[in-house]
Amino acid sequence: MLKKEQNDLLTQTGPGTPMGDLFRRYWLPVLLKEELPEPGCEPVRVQLLSERMIAIRDTEGNYGLMDEFCAHRGVSLWFGRHEPGGIRCPYHGWKYRTDGQCVEVPSEPEGSKLCDRIKLKAYPLVERGDILWTYMGPPEMQPPLPEFEFAMVPSSQRFTSKRIQESNWLQALEGGIDSSHVSWLHRDSLNSDPLFKGAAGNQYNLQDMRPVFEVVDSDDGLFVGVRRNAGPDKYYWRVTPWIVPYFTMVPPRGDHPIHGHFWVPIDDEHCWTWSFDYHARRDLTEHEVQAMRDGKGIHVKYVPGTFIPMQNKANNYLIDRQAQREGRTYSGVDGIGMQDASLQESMGPIQDRTREFLTSTDNGIVMMRRRLMRVIKEMQEGVEPPALQPEAHHVRSAAVVIGRDEDFRVAAKDALRVQPDRGHASV
C-alpha cells in the first residue's frame, strides 16, 4: 500500500506539482485530427493537467493550443471568431495568433505597444498518426516527436479513439498493466468479442486462473511478464510494456489488431483514456474498423456529440444483471473498455491506496509506482526522465509459448522491439 503523501505525489498533476512537471516533459495526445478538420473550423475546449485551453486551426490551417481566456476580461475564446492570422475575442475585439501573441487591441490609440506585452500561455500542437499532440514543458527541453509504432504505420492500418474516464489517471493506468483480471472480468469477451475471439491463446487465459507475474525493469519503464500453463512442458507468456509515464500495449491475440492505451490526466479526478488498434503488416479490414466504431474491443460507444461513454456512472453502466446471472457477461457490463472503466471508476475519483491489500499478481503495479516515484525524485535532482527519445517508443507487446525452462526475457527479446519486416509475436 502507499502512504497518503505518496498517493498525493502520484495523483496530483496540476501546474507546479512534481507529477505534473513530469507529464509536462512528454508529448501528450490532445485531440483526434478529425476534431479540427479544416482551416477556420470551430475551436475545441481542452483541459489537460488542470489547465483550461482552446485548440484552434486558423484560416491558414495552422494549429494552436492556448489559454482559453482572453487577457482583457477573461472571456472564453471558444466564442471567438476566426479572421486571417488569428482568432478575435467577440467581447472587445482583441485578436490573437495561434502562438497566443496578441496582435490587435482595437480600442488602443495608433502607435500603442500594448499588444507587444500581451501573450497568452500557448503550446505547440502537432499532427502525427491522426492525433494532435502537445508539449507543455519548458520549450528548451522539448523532445523529438513520438514514434510509437501505431502512429507511424499508414492510416489504413490503425484506428484510434478516446473517452473521458471519471477517475484519476493512475488507477486507469494500473488497470492497463494488471493482466490477472482478464481471466475474470473479460472471460466472456475472449470468446465473443470480434476483436478477441478465435485466438489460440484465449484458452490459456481461461484454463489457468493463477497467473504468475515476473516484472522486469527496462530503461524506459517495465516489461510485465505474465505466465500461464500451456501444457506439461510449456508456458504461455503475455508481456505488456509500460513506458513512462503513460503508455501501455496489450499483448496480441492471433491475427487480430494490437491494442494499446495512453492515460492522460484532465485534472486530478478525470482522465482521457486514449485507445488505439493497429496491425503492423496489413490494413485493418472493414469488419474490424466497424467493430471498433461500434464499441467493440477496447473502444466504446459515446453519448452522441461527446466523448462520454454511453455506459457511464449516471446510468450504472447499463449493467445487465440477467446477462450476469446467465454468464453472458461476467460483470453484467458489456464491452471490454467499459468493463474496465466501470470498476476503475467505482473506486472513487482517487483511490485510497492506504487501505488496499496487494498480492503477488500486483507486482507490476507496485514496481510501476516505485519507478514513478524514483523518476520524480531523480528529475528534481536534475536527471533527465526516461523515454523522451523516439528510440524508447520502438517497443511492442508479445504473446509467446515457450519451454518452462526458458527465460521470457531472452526468448521474447526480439519480439519486444519494433521490426518493420516482421509482424507481432502472437498466439
Image: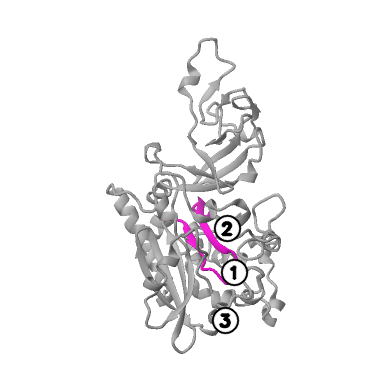
Q: Amino acid at mark 2?
A: Phe
Tell me the crowding category of disc 1: few under 14, some 14 to 19, or many 20 or more residues within 10 angstroms, Cα based. Answer: some
The relative height of residue 117 versus residue 197 in the rendered view (above or below) is above
Tell me the crowding category of disc 3: few under 14, some 14 to 19, or many 20 or more residues within 10 angstroms, Cα based. Answer: some
Residue 425 coordinates in the image, percent (x, y)? 50, 69
Q: Amino acid at mark 1?
A: Asp
Tell which circle, 2 or 3, labels the residue nearer the N-terminal end: 3
Q: Residue furthest bottom?
A: 232
Image disc number at residue 255: 1
Describe the element under mark 3 as helix, strand or loop.
helix
User: 344 left or right of 215?
Assistant: right
Image disc number at residue 276: 2
The relative height of residue 102 versus residue 110 in the rendered view (above or below) is below
Describe the element under mark 1 as helix, strand or loop.
loop
Tell us which disc is closer to us: 2 or 1. 1
For the record, the magenta segment spans 245-270
